[in-house]
Image (cartoon, grey):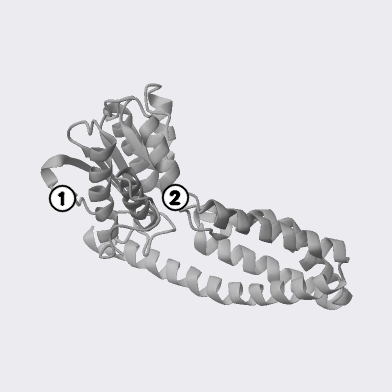
Amino acid sequence: MSDTAQAERFGAREGAAARAWVAAHWFGLGVAVVTAAAAAGLAVLPRETRLLAACAGAVPLLALVVARSSGSPETRHMIFLLPFLAVAVGAGLVRLGRVWAPLALATLVAAQLAWAWDRTPELFTWEPEVRQEARADAAAYLAATTGPRDVLLGYDPLFLQAWEQRPEFPLLVLPRADADLALRTLLKLERPLGHGVWVFDASKTTNFERSLEIPRVSPRPASEFEVRDFGPFLVIRTRTPVLTPERYLLRAGQAMLVGKRLFLGDADINLPTIERAARALRGYGASRSLSTSSR
């Protein structure tokens, strides 16, 4: 059985490597096609259209700078530019003529499918059965142990699944990417606060390496936390209620260090948010992280 398990893991790694190779080659080609087509399309689009596209990109970025949001802009935040990009690419493809335009379009579609296959293979191969079972067990554990005053950080699908099983499950979740908003939300919660609850998922695409198993690693001091693992899910919970925002942020930082030790992508966002919120709560503002050793 151990040989079978090793073979399955080896096969999964080989499949992931194959997907990464295909995605890297097709994605690079797709970027080249999109860039060339968009540049050609912008050259023939009306001046008003080019001006509108420039404003659509510049205004939100300027707003983020003025607002001094602690959440870093990511590619998903630029989704509102997709219609303008599609218009520019379409205008550029039309200029290629009847022969080259279909070939370029086919290349672009293949690149998009290859990238999607690499980033979210579940869209094509469905969620592994072992992860479905682990997700159900983790959600049941959360539903059974989480009280209405417990504090959650960062939305996770497990929370919705737990809420479906227990209506008393907390509805409010602290945002993970904005320290100011996270602190305001934390201070609005009814006190005394309940337990701190955090979830890590080793199978997420944001991790350095995806896995359907996660080691049961406890934050320090271990006496302050309960830790359960369910397949790729690690559920961390304080043994006693945190009571105050200050104590919650202390325990949250300790819990996030586990994610850093395991190279989990969520911790790269959560830990700076917690550090900045703690700094702001002490009256120093949320302009920078407290720790450089965790980066």
Where is residue 219? Give x, y as percent: 19, 49
Residue 98 as seen in the image, left or right of residue 86: right
At x 44% / y 50%, what residue is drawn?
A: 177
Which disc is residue 189 wearing?
A: none
CA neighbours of label 1 inside 10 A, class few (<14), some (14 to 19), many (20+): few
Residue 52, image quadrant: bottom right
Q: Residue furthest toward the left?
A: 223
Q: Quadrant of the C terminus?
A: bottom left
Label 2 crowd (10 A; few <14 / some 14-19 / many >=20): many
From what the image shows, is residue 153 above or below residue 11? above
Q: Nearer the viewer, mark 1 or mark 2?
A: 2
Q: Which one is nearer the viewer's eye here, 237 or 112?
A: 237
Name the amino acid, label 2: Ala
Mark 1 near mark 2, Cβ–Cβ under 8 Å? Answer: no
Residue wearing tag 2: 177
Quarter the N terminus occupies: bottom left
Q: Is residue 47 left or right of residue 168?
A: right
Q: Secondary structure at mark 2?
A: loop
Q: Residue type at mark 1: give it.
A: Arg
Q: Which residue is mark 1?
A: 220
Q: Nearer the viewer, residue 195 or 32?
A: 195
Measured along the vertical axis of the image, is residue 249 above or below residue 75? Answer: above
At horizontal 36% and vertical 33% (from top left) the residue drawn is 187
Provide residue 249's location: percent of width, then percent of height.
28, 43
Q: Is residue 60 left or right of residue 198?
A: right
